[in-house]
Image (spheres, coloured by chain):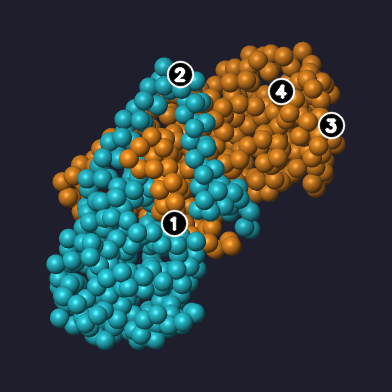
Chain colours: A orange, B cyan
Amino acid sequence: MSQLYSRVALIGLGLIASSMALAIRRDGLAGEVVGTARSDETRRIAEEIGLCDRVVPTVAEAVAGADLVVLATPIGAMGAIAEEIAPHLAPGATVTDVGSVKRAVVEAVGPHIPAGVHFIPGHPLAGTEHSGPRSGFPELFDGRWCVLAPPEGTDPAAVDKLAALWRAMGSQVDLMDVARHDLVLAVTSHAPHLIAYTMVGVADDLRRVTDSEVVKYSAAGFRDFTRIAASDPTMWRDVFLTNKDATLEILGRFTEELFALQRAIRTGDGDHLHDYFTRTRAIRRGIIEAGQDTDAPDFGRAAARK
Amino acid sequence: MSQLYSRVALIGLGLIASSMALAIRRDGLAGEVVGTARSDETRRIAEEIGLCDRVVPTVAEAVAGADLVVLATPIGAMGAIAEEIAPHLAPGATVTDVGSVKRAVVEAVGPHIPAGVHFIPGHPLAGTEHSGPRSGFPELFDGRWCVLAPPEGTDPAAVDKLAALWRAMGSQVDLMDVARHDLVLAVTSHAPHLIAYTMVGVADDLRRVTDSEVVKYSAAGFRDFTRIAASDPTMWRDVFLTNKDATLEILGRFTEELFALQRAIRTGDGDHLHDYFTRTRAIRRGIIEAGQDTDAPDFGRAAARK
């Protein structure tokens, strides 16, 4: 694969940035990958495992001479970082991010981007329940979607180049406006995460059911919720605080529907339940056909992998 | 492994029974495995793939001469089957079941069991999102728990023998009373399934977000819900109708907690959210340590399996 950028600066070295570093360096997509992180410990680990070509202590040093700057911190930190790096950005550079919410990033980062620098918000829809610099792997983006949300009037050549980088790392790329992105993600990601967090919290609270019983019998469904609810707390706090309206709207719809199903249980309306469950089964088929999951019998996964 | 039963009768040939047939025959745990199912098509497939030693058209024929009878149909059908097989059960035989709810099975099946026949309700906590006679695999029970809920006064030798069969098929075995079982499963399985069904239904209903968007971007969390919500509709209808009280109690707690988190989002209480998400992350660790899941980064699974 040919080199797309001469120097990529990764700010924040968690799951996404460390996976990007590994994918970019595996395929020679950039001349140099420079990384930084706020925590001394994170930078030390990144050095130790050789994640980047260079690890530097400040964001100003990281962005100096970079033609691509990737903000890969929790969303709540991005505004202050943008302000700090602004005077150090190279003319013609592109600034992007990997945050799960887009409107809040545009509002926090956009005003700090100097003229002559391209700002192209992005969101790779990929992840695992792990976090930190050791959690990355270069195949993370394979077959996943990356959404780019360039503001009106952004230089098409800069967008094409960033899209080419994501494709080279294995992603498919979609363009979407920020409001649409935030609504779609509230449905496919933000509301499901809050629901999973809630269910796991309820199980933990119920003193009538001991922790060991919940853990022992988790394979019956609960286990998948714990996996989602193990995602990074800081990242998710910021997602909910910054995509408040869309998330609350979807949760409102969810509660309404849940009440209707609870009523069907209470009144013994088996037909309603059966029809509902038959319909949801069909959606699963669509996801498998679209290549976003496999058909392998995954509930039995630990056993099958022994 | 030595033979434990001379003839096992499997009534219903779905995921659980077909996995049992394969595990029993792989290890020679019974002299003969006889199967039956209500649907002609299911019996035909079972014949075609050689699932059992014999497939017979009626439950009466299936249980004749069997020293172990396994009810493996949806729970709603078990009472009528128990009534039908009662006159044909061999003296000294054991009748068990694999239903996800135990009190309802005891109430529906118990009264029909003749004197001299052992009745030991059971529940293997294992499954996948697939169903039907082709979905079974002999490793399904490996490392999973099977709960037995024998009524007071059940012959301990009969319980030990059934427990030995489950252990030989790979399970760990626990004894529990029926009320406790139904409460624990409401937390670890029944409420999570209803919640997953609801979230998938909401996504499908929302006309503001297209189905193709939901499917494309499902990898961000929603995908795990669709997997759970692809489980067998008839089985799950019966679970909710027969474990009504415990399920509604847990859903009530869930809704209360969800409202508290929604309020934290609305008021911008980031500390509350962060504390909650940190606590739920710890539960995940317990499940991995208990061997009920692996630590592999599973969100990225489709990619990693290419």
Residue occupying image coordinates x 25% and y 67%: B154
Instruction: Say if A182 sits above or below B285 in the image.
Output: above
Per the image, the residue denoted by label 4 is: A38
Q: Are marks 4 and 3 on the same chain?
A: yes
- Looking at the rendered structure, the kind of residue marked 2 is Asp
Circle 1 sits on which residue? A285
Residue in the image at 38% along x and 34% along y: A205
Q: In the displayed structure, would residue A61 be above or below residue B217? A: above
Determine whether the residue tagged by mark 4 lies in a helix, strand or loop: loop
Chain to which the residue tagged by mark 1 belongs? A
Q: Chain of mark 2?
A: B
The spot of residue A25 in percent (x, y) is 80, 42
Three-letter amino acid code of the residue under disc 3: Arg
Name the residue type under label 1: Arg
Mark 1 or 4, which is nearer the eye? 4
x, y percent for residue A169: 71, 44
Amino acid type at circle 4 is Arg
- For the residues labelled 1 and 2, the Cα–Cα distance comes to 38 Å
Residue located beneath label 2 in the image: B269
Numbered disc in front, either 1 or 2: 2
Number of numbered discs on residues: 4
Residue B44: horizontal and vertical position, in percent? 34, 81
